[in-house]
Image (tube, coloured by chain):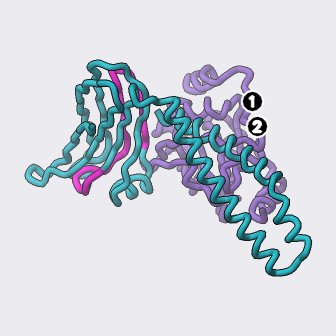
Amino acid sequence: MAAALAVLASLPAFAAPPALDSAAPDFALKGIDGRNLRLSEFRGEPVILHFWASWCGPCRESATSLDRFGAATVTPVVGVNLDGTVGRAAAVAQSLQLQSPTLVDSQQVVARAYDVARLPLTLLIDADGTIRAAWSGIAPNLAELDPHLQRLRQD
Amino acid sequence: MQPITILSRRRSTRLAALFAACALCAVPVPILHAETGDSAGLKTVDQDVQALKKQLIDLNRDLFKLEEELLYPASTQVAVFLSVDVGTFFALDSVTLKVDDKEVANYLYTEREVQALHRGGVQKLYLGNLKAGEHEITAFFTGKGPHERDYRRGTTLKVEKAVGAKYVELRISDREASLQPEFVVRQWE
């Protein structure tokens, strides 16, 4: 609970997620497996960026469904966990059986760069690093996400 | 440091895109060729597009150089580079750079970036301005040392900034005798 309050307190009160068709801010974070990952290394293919925390119910649901969706559609899904500690994030990711990389934004630096005001935040980023679709505060509807992804792959 | 560089590139790209748009408006010839539909015309269109692309890249590069010269004049410019020589005894994870005790760069390295450094790549870690006089540059390296142990090492260099650009290289190499990594800071004039 304390961690949840700390995360909420650190987020801007009236911020909106980055606008559609704007460049997704690049970042590098450490994953729960100890490996560092940089968003720009996914350039050349669409990627789903998902901000989540364990204390947020819809986040856990969407993390699981996006993980499966990514595996089924061979789309990279990058989870950014805002729990604050690697141990906590790793335990939750393991309990949810997530296969996609889970990065830990312990200082909420990336959350600030993306103006994460509501969780979960899911962004669909195209091959050029531009944000093409966003779902803030709700789990993305996979039936809605799929055509977006198909369109990006055709472009 | 880097954010400034990124912003500069974006601005340059925008300017370049604007110039390109103007250039496209000013070149009606390819459109005429396309309308005729013959293969020779299409070839010319392709050549024109390629030439335009080259001009755009050149223009973007020139604008980037110009912007860098304006933001970081040679009289105050300080650049810090990082390179890795062998690196058997140290797997780089991150570098934090401080200038006069103020953090100016903090970089987390991915596997690909480390591989690029091992292949001889040199990273521009920081580009900034410093007034003439004595300054202290400190770098903290974190990673895995010998026997996969967490390793953190700091190294400091006092530099005398005169009129003219100052270039500093942080070099990670292996000290074979002690089977330990070595962190060298050296100045280029």
Q: Colour of chain B?
A: cyan
Range of the magenta residues? Answer: B84-108
Task: Report the residue that reaches farthest toward the bottom.
Answer: B39
In the rendered structure, the answer to whether residue A33 lies left or right of residue B44 reads: left
Identity, as a three-letter code, of the amino acid under mark 1: Ala
Where residue B95 appears, as percent x and y from the top left, is 36, 38
Q: Secondary structure at mark 2?
A: loop
The answer to whether residue A109 of the structure is visible from this angle is yes
Q: Quadrant of the C terminus of chain B?
A: top left
B34 magenta-colored:
no
Q: Write the residue at 79% across / 79% down.
A: B40
Identify the residue position indicated by label 2 in the image: A19
Residue A149 versus residue A114 in the image, above or below: below
Q: Secondary structure at mark 1?
A: loop
Q: Write the residue at 64% across / 24% down.
A: A11
Q: Write the residue at 51% across / 29% down.
A: B71
Crowding near pointer 2: few (<14 within 10 Å), some, many (20+)? some
Residue B96 versus residue B83 in the image, above or below: above
Whether label 1 touches label 2, CB < 8 Å: yes
B85 magenta-colored:
yes
Identify the residue position indicated by label 1 in the image: A16
Q: Colour of chain A?
A: purple
The answer to whether residue A60 of the structure is visible from this angle is no
Q: Looking at the image, how many numbered discs can be counted on the residues?
A: 2
Identity, as a three-letter code, of the amino acid under mark 2: Ala
The front one of A143 and B92 is: B92
- Chain ID for label 1? A
Quarter of the image where one finds residue B125: top left
In the rendered structure, the answer to whether residue A65 lies left or right of residue B160 reads: right
Q: Nearer the viewer, mark 1 or mark 2?
A: 2
Residue B143 versus residue B73 in the image, above or below: below
Crowding near pointer 1: few (<14 within 10 Å), some, many (20+)? few
